[in-house]
Image: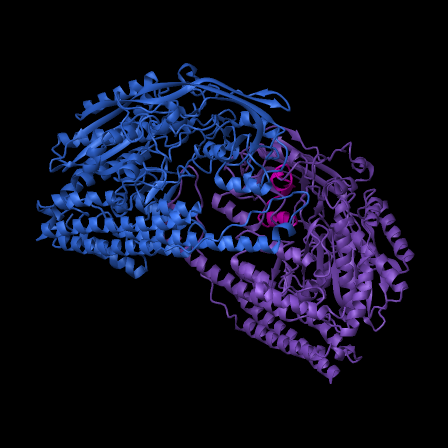
Chain colours: A purple, B blue
Amino acid sequence: MVHIPMKRFVIHLLCLSLGLPVAFSAESGPLRGFSAESTRTERDWETKFRAVPDPANLRAYMQRLAARPHHVGSPYDKDNAEWILAKLKEWGLDAQIETFDVLFPTPKERLLELVEPTHVTAKLEEPAVSTDPTSSQRQEQLPTYNAYSIDGDVTAPLVYLNYGIPEDYEMLDRLGISVKGAMVIARYGGSWRGIKPKVAAEHGAVGCLIYSDPRDDGYFQGEVFPEGAYRNKDGVQRGSVMDMPVYPGDPLTPGVGATKDAKRLPRNEAVTLTKIPVLPISYGDAQPLLAALKGRVAPQNWRGALPMTYHVGPGPAKVHLKLAFNWDLKTIYDVIARIPGATYPEEWIIRGNHHDGWVNGAEDPISGLGPLLEEARGLGMLLRQGWKPKRTIVLCAWDGEEPGLLGSTEWAEAHAEELQRNAAVYINSDGNGRGYLEVEGSHTLERFINGVAREIDDPESRLSVWKRLQFRRIGNPPPAATPQDRQELRSRPDLRIGALGSGSDYTAFLDHLGIASVDMSFGGEDGGGIYHSIYDDFYWYTHFSDTDFAYGRALAQAAGTTVMRLADAELLPFDFDDLTDTVKRYVEEVEKLARDKRDQTIERNRQIDEGLFAAIEDPRHKMVAPPKEAVPPFLNFAPLENGLAALQRSAQLYDEALTHATENGGSALARAALREANAKLITVERALTLKDGLPNRPWFKHQIYAPGFYTGYGVKTLPAVRESIEQKQWKLADEEIVKVGTVLENAGEAIQGATAELGKAVR
Amino acid sequence: MVHIPMKRFVIHLLCLSLGLPVAFSAESGPLRGFSAESTRTERDWETKFRAVPDPANLRAYMQRLAARPHHVGSPYDKDNAEWILAKLKEWGLDAQIETFDVLFPTPKERLLELVEPTHVTAKLEEPAVSTDPTSSQRQEQLPTYNAYSIDGDVTAPLVYLNYGIPEDYEMLDRLGISVKGAMVIARYGGSWRGIKPKVAAEHGAVGCLIYSDPRDDGYFQGEVFPEGAYRNKDGVQRGSVMDMPVYPGDPLTPGVGATKDAKRLPRNEAVTLTKIPVLPISYGDAQPLLAALKGRVAPQNWRGALPMTYHVGPGPAKVHLKLAFNWDLKTIYDVIARIPGATYPEEWIIRGNHHDGWVNGAEDPISGLGPLLEEARGLGMLLRQGWKPKRTIVLCAWDGEEPGLLGSTEWAEAHAEELQRNAAVYINSDGNGRGYLEVEGSHTLERFINGVAREIDDPESRLSVWKRLQFRRIGNPPPAATPQDRQELRSRPDLRIGALGSGSDYTAFLDHLGIASVDMSFGGEDGGGIYHSIYDDFYWYTHFSDTDFAYGRALAQAAGTTVMRLADAELLPFDFDDLTDTVKRYVEEVEKLARDKRDQTIERNRQIDEGLFAAIEDPRHKMVAPPKEAVPPFLNFAPLENGLAALQRSAQLYDEALTHATENGGSALARAALREANAKLITVERALTLKDGLPNRPWFKHQIYAPGFYTGYGVKTLPAVRESIEQKQWKLADEEIVKVGTVLENAGEAIQGATAELGKAVR
């Protein structure tokens, strides 16, 4: 151990002489937030921990937990929760089940038929596959449906609208096609599914079908199940269509926990239910409907892989859709374990993954929950060996993620006050596969999580998962990686992490409560098309994904190391350099967005004035010219720039203070007076929120990250500013720039608070 | 007429005040190469001419000429030639038929069968369609085949290789798949078809199938014939696979006319025949073969629109291909009419379109030949009214274009000496459709052809075809048109024209003889999938293309105006500004190409050294790392830059001299002493050639334009330099840069010669 510094020095010289970058090895110096001595202790415990996760256990967990359908309200959902509870207790942890009562509709009637020009009734069923034992559990399977669609009985001409996202409607406008009074059919993809009925309803459609085109996850991508991993002609993607970008969780209890006695909205006041009936279908059921469409041939990038010419309609296909649901309250079962912190028990490190599935849910979510259970088992072992985490660790197996992040959101709302006071970091996963470590999260954690990634061995390459990811990004062909990107990838100490949108249980923690969060998983080497179908089961996973659970083990090691290192650090290892660097990019992006919108409007208006659209009209394929629009005004970005500058200054001062504190092997960090510094550090992510939230969706408080109002999964960074510009609300944009500028200044002040406390601790 | 200048002035002011560019109206000033007075005369004649072409005639010509199959060697091919001859004579023109005897193989035996894992025999037939009367002329139709495939009888495992172009083999190398000893199947597209068997043979394949994927011209694009315009499941694209990038024309008589007594190569010395047997098939016949492939799933951009997962193989599909041909000499019939010039009879303006088809050939070639006939009729009328073109006009209806540009090439070779002395410009067409004027050609003609385009009314928009094309280009969404492109499109006087590759009858004129050439047609509004099938006929054309022949009329007007204006000008209207501007872009392109090759090699070698390829290996989908390569040296581009500078200087001096000559209403141009200036101007395009031609293909003499050795249709500009770099022949590249630099200097000197003569004429 003593010789490591010298060895590092030699490698450093060697690298310099070869012109190679110095590798940022796992061994370099004390860990961020640790003293030299506590670093050694931490490394010992972490090494012990990483030896624990066992692929055989992961396999056994999946076999047990995915053995039967385990959706919200099913007997096996509750059974799984109780089994998880028992396991946590068996491993010596203090665990309990917390329940909530949530609105969870299930189908009472589903009818879809083509009524003109011919009559075809859709099957709406996924058949059992003989080689796949759990696919035949018809009795317990939820039928194929979209949760939180309203009831409806409509007959209307059909219109195909690609992914059904806002830009598809711009194309429809150009084609002169309206969806008013129509039944629309969109393919899955391009956005979160709930966006499709939402935008369709905004445009006057009366019903919405969503199908899985074989281009996107069927035979175009690879052999279909059971011969291969992809969606067969009867496979259907279930899923929620609740308007989660407004607020996730129980539609009846926005902002508060759905406890037994919570005050509930009447159902007709729940704004997150859809406005029109929605049904997901297979491409086997979609093909006769699409084939019966005439009218304009679909634009090239709208066409899928069915062997036919895609048309937009409207009609002559006319479709009848009838849907009725049981609108019951169901009980959900969150399993929560707590390991109390020895030094800072009031600071919480929270780790979660949901346990409910749409059907048997092996990949989603058990491939992510299994690792969490191995982490719990490992931490239990360490505790018995004398390990004492400084902070409190909370391990969560959420229920009800699938219908709308119910378990995590209701828990976060129910415990909002404690969480706001105590929660330092939330670490999420939601399934796992083979390949590369994929991390998204708060950029206050970017540097820290890079450090963790350097510790984890990749099962295939035997390199660190960090190194392999760096290679993957360097190896991306242009335009994914330009020469400039490669230079940054080789020279920047940290690989960039993406920002979090939505679609999993971190949402309430990050977006509603302002708790620094990360989401992690492995993936990128296998594809598949069983998502939210009856075929996402043990048979599929063990034939087509991480079949030997080697990456399941790696996820347990990565997430477990993350939890331990956060819980054990003397000083919370937040970093504000990478945050500042990232926010600077976001500011540049929104400035460019405003510029581009202006330039594009000027150019389009000019084209309209010139008569361009009339000139290039093809009389056989008439297009509607876009309308002239007011040229966007110049916006005043100075408040955002000033906020950023303040943040930059604060980040730099904190960095200097931290360097000062950690020189001499970080002995200053060993002192006890860091409690206040830690407490201030926790407030930084909170300072990035606003109490009133985003315009028109007050539940979403974070001002740096939010799921897009019209993307659903996809993140919008600096969302208030970016979406105002995208939606051409110029006055609002100017107002929001001021607010977000203030938020950045507030975050800078919070950092200064931490810097001051750190200074006291060092003195 | 007198008020036009004032009106223009007012418009000019109006445009300036609106910030709009001044329209380059058809009326602006004297025509290039004309005096003020002769401009007025010319305009009068042109106006008379443009009133002549009549859609009803175009329709009648097509009905007659496409009534029966009229491929080389067929009775109707000869019959058509004689009918055209009679028409030309009827219109008062001096016309004759010139014949050549060329090698033209036709199928004796065609057998294609899947022999493993199951047995399927391919149909290899296009069925008659009841609504399409000529589709049933089975007796006279050529079977589906690729002309100049060698005989063969091979059985081999199958490999799918996308388009079968060189970059697809780079991907095969990465996948670790060899085609040695294999039967390959490529889809049409991505290159000229003859490239596919050529590259396959270079890589050791023993046979080659080419099929039409529905992604490219079938149901993916639109409804299939007869319901729509696109290729149905039995439609086959016939076509030549002769190695035309080496030399086109009769394989047995390279460089000389295939007259009766010409010296002929023995067939086994004809290098332009394929090295392996080749057969084109429908996707109906291809689907069982492709479906029987296993092994690697094809890369995403290799996949077509068949409803299946595309695999690469090799095997388990094994295929038997047996082909035998009649290797006969056939007579071809070029129909040539001459209108002798009144002033400069030794200067020829040549206009051509072929008359042979693969089957009934309505779109290809009759939709282009019809306009040529209307031009001939119009010129005949003008001559009877007293019009006297200064230069000789030669009108050509070529035979044998389809098998390998036979008629035009043999004629050009037979008359090479006269042509080199006399030919000023060659104007080609080869079919026509609806939409935008598409012009490619010598950039010495770019300015001139822009002037013609301003005269022609677009039938749909009633704007000039120039204006409509400008709008189309401005309206292209990014990246097709960037803001910089739009600015150029609005401010540059001339719309850019593309460079000529190959694929039609201009090839011998431009590439072999150095005669300035243009190719023109309308298109861009309709698609279709009947190319080289039995369904390219009168029924298809009059249902799905320029059904009222309005654009046929526009083509006759555009090409006829081009011919007249070139034949009537006092001074040939070549321009060297646009040439220089264009060559400068080419020079910058090859310099960038060399830089990029260097940078890419350095980067890839670095990745290999770093171990990147091993690190990102997916054990379930192994890839072969590319080999390390020597870093390309820096090339000396100075000779090319110096040549360009010389060309620029000469172009500028010529421009000044021409301005001087045309000021005072261009009265100097009215003088008689321009004969020498014209003679010198003709030499400029010749000066862009080298007697020894391109490296390894001496038939191709032009040093600015050539069809790519590995693209076939697609042009390679500065071909000797560009292809040396692409093929990593660095020493050769340095040598060719010197040669091409000299060529540019030679062209500069030729221009100086013209400038000097022009000076004498003015003095």
Q: Position of residue B78 (x, y in %)?
A: 30, 19
Q: Residue furthest top?
A: B139
A45 is higher (above) or lower (below) than B156? below
Q: Position of residue B493 (x, y in %)?
A: 28, 52
Q: Look at the image and give the residue range highlighted in magenta.
A: A193-220
B142 is higher (above) or lower (below) than A232? above
- Asked whether A586 or B723 is in front, the reply is B723
Q: Position of residue B118 (x, y in %)?
A: 63, 22
The residue under the point 81% across, 36% down is A133
Q: Position of residue B383 (x, y in %)?
A: 14, 31
The reply to whether residue A244 is visible in this rendering is yes
Q: Residue furthest bottom?
A: A763
- Asked whether A29 or A635 is in front, the reply is A29
Is residue B655 on the magenta stretch?
no
Would residue B380 be found to the left or right of residue A526 on screen? left
How many numbered tags mark residues here? Answer: 0
- Asked whether A432 or A170 is in front, the reply is A432
Is residue A202 on the magenta stretch?
yes
Would residue B204 be found to the left or right of residue A22 on screen? left
The residue under the point 53% across, 20% down is B123
The reply to whether residue A299 is visible in this rendering is no
- Asked whether B350 or B650 is in front, the reply is B650
Q: Tell me the quarter of the picture where residue B375 sits.
A: top left
A749 is higher (above) or lower (below) than A461? below
Q: Tell me the quarter of the picture where residue B641 sits.
A: bottom left
